[in-house]
Amino acid sequence: MALWGMVIDLDRCTGCQACVVACKAENNVPPVGAKEAVRGRIISWMQVLTEEDEEHDGEVKRFVPRPCLQCDDPPCTKVCPVYATYRNPEGIVAQIYARCIGCRFCMAACPYNAKYFNWHRYQKEAPGQNPDVSLRPKGVVEKCTFCHHRLQKARERALAERRELAPGEYVTACAEVCPARAIVFGDLSDPGSEVHRLARSPRAFRLLEALGTKPKVIYLSEGEGRG
Ligand code: SF4
Ligand code: SF4
């Protein structure tokens, strides 16, 4: 069985935000106005964080794209009182919006701030929306799903053509659009995949590894890995 994962090369990322925009368009995440932004109500399933260099007057040292890290041992799923979030057999941490009661326990449990409370009522059938992704109701928690709908679509296509899913046929919107090729997506359990190879690079590291959450989004950076 596949184990979907992502490798993000921080030495390649230019902070262009193409992944952020692609994610919003793909997953029907609407922008909010200035007033809502000030109240902390922006939703950004993919966010590019900046790390500042204290030695050089706070200059930007590097950019850190942060989707849901799809932890293999996710703390968010363990606190949900209504089982509205779970890890599926292929390692994707999913949300069931119809079950979510908006208590936000999972947001508090996520050490990576990857979950968002939806304060907004989505515009129904606005032009440009992706029909493959459901609109979330107001009052639920949402997050990056590794564009899971793309996997379902690719599987249906393969089934109709009576063949197996081909390597590289399922890829997230952020990985597809990154002009710097900083994001590589694929099956971590496939020894022939690029993501498998990169995850074993000496430059590889995981965010807050000591917490034991085992993220399946793995970062690369010179000097950060195993030496
Ligand atoms: S699209 Fe690629 S280069 Fe641009 S911010 Fe995202 S990861 Fe970095
Ligand atoms: S990054 Fe946060 S939301 Fe995503 S699986 Fe891990 S704990 Fe859950």
Image (cartoon, rainbow, N blue to C red):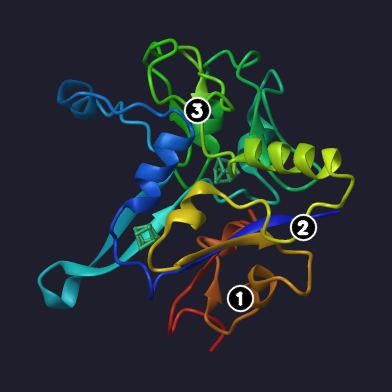
Q: Which residue is mark 2?
A: 166
Q: Residue at x 67, y 23 (%)?
A: 84
Q: Are marks 1 and 3 in contact (CB under 8 Å)?
A: no
Q: Nearer the viewer, residue 40 or 97?
A: 97
Residue 27 is situated, as x and y percent measured from the top left of the image, at 48, 33
For mark 1, give the secondary structure.
helix
Q: Residue at x 31, y 30 (%)?
A: 42
Above/below status of 185 relative to 11: above
Name the quarter showing ligand 2.
top right
C-alpha separation, residue under disc 2 versus residue under disc 1:
20 Å
C-alpha separation, residue under disc 3 versus residue under disc 2:
24 Å
Q: Which residue is mark 3?
A: 130
Residue 115 is situated, as x and y percent measured from the top left of the image, at 48, 35
Residue 18 is situated, as x and y percent measured from the top left of the image, at 34, 52
Query: Quarter of the image holding residue 58?
Result: bottom left
Amino acid, disc 1: Leu
Above/below status of 139 relative to 157: above
Alpha-carbon neighbours of circle 3 within 10 Å: few (<14), some, or many (≥20)?
Answer: some
Mark 1 or 3, closer to the camera: 3
